[in-house]
Image (spheres, helix red, strand yellow):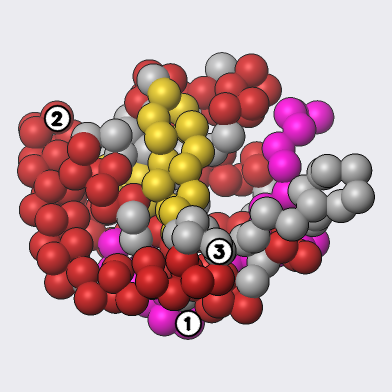
């Protein structure tokens, strides 16, 4: 209980601060590179639900351009993903700016991933329990399949994490996440570049 309420946040602040400090050269290089590729727009901001459904603004490096068709609609993700963006996403470097979210207290290093706002009314009561804790940069679902597992399985992993938070579990997730970043597992879904949209429970 002490870990969940106090120590977890302490670890978040320490690790995210050190991480931003050590990775600042990489951070600056990516900002300059993505400014060139994305017309001076290196960051991607999006509103997502956080703990207790409070709204947070997630910060990520932009991996896709804003190309549109003749009707003004955005092209599919696979057509907008730049070569630079593909590398940044495959190495999970696009998630680095979320360390700022962690420092601000919007997110945690470990927790259920913050998903889209439009999913909120689609969750079952059990699935909605994933919002009982701060969302994380990585989590139990991410090291157990990430974008290659079904939404139902992902939510089951998220809720299981909520019920079993501990220092030991968080360290296990952190270590396994680092490993998966190097081997680049589970980045894309089976059907495309990103995870398919959640449309509700059958």
Asked whether the beta carbons under mark 1 and mark 2 sit within 8 Å of each other, the answer is no
Q: Position of residue 89 (x, y in %)?
A: 52, 68
Q: Position of residue 158 (x, y in %)?
A: 46, 40
Disc with the residue nearer the chain's start (2 vs 3)? 2
Question: In the rendered view, does 101 fall on the left or right side of 13?
Answer: right
Q: Is residue 163 visible?
A: no
Residue at numbered disc 1: 183
> Which sits in the foreground, 155 or 29?
29
Identify the residue at horizontal 48%, vertical 32% (top origin): 48
Mark carried by residue 125: none
Between residue 142 and residue 69, name the one nearer to us: 69
Secondary structure of residue under mark 2: helix
The residue identified by callout 2 is 5
Which quadrant is home to the N terminus? top left
Which quadrant of the view contains residue 96?
bottom left
Compared with residue 184, is residue 4 higher up or lower down, i.e. above or below?
Answer: above
Where are the magenta residues, as a range? 174-202
Mark 3 or mark 1: which is in front?
A: 3
**Which of the two residues, 147 or 27, is positioned nearer the viewer here?**
27
Marks 1 and 2 sit apart, C-alpha to C-alpha, by 33 Å
């Amino acid at each position: 209980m002490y870990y969940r309420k106090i120590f977890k946040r302490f670890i978040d602040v320490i690790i995210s601060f050190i991480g931003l400090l050590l990775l600042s050269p990489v951070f600056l290089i990516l900002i300059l590179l993505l400014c060139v590729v994305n017309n001076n727009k290196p960051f991607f901001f999006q509103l997502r639900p956080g703990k207790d459904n409070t709204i947070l603004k997630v910060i990520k490096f932009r991996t896709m351009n804003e190309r549109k068709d003749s009707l003004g609609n955005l092209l599919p993700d696979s057509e907008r993903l730049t070569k630079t963006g593909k590398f940044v996403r495959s190495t999970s470097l696009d998630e680095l700016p979320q360390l700022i979210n962690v420092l601000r207290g919007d997110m945690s290093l470990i927790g259920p991933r913050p998903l889209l706002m439009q999913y909120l009314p689609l969750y079952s009561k059990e699935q909605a329990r994933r919002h009982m804790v701060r969302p994380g940069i990585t989590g139990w679902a991410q090291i157990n399949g990430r974008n290659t597992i079904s939404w139902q399985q992902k939510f089951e992993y998220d809720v299981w994490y909520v019920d079993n938070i501990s220092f030991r579990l968080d360290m296990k997730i952190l270590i396994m996440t680092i490993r998966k970043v190097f081997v680049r597992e589970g980045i894309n879904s089976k059907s495309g570049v990103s995870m398919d949209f959640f449309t509700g429970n059958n």
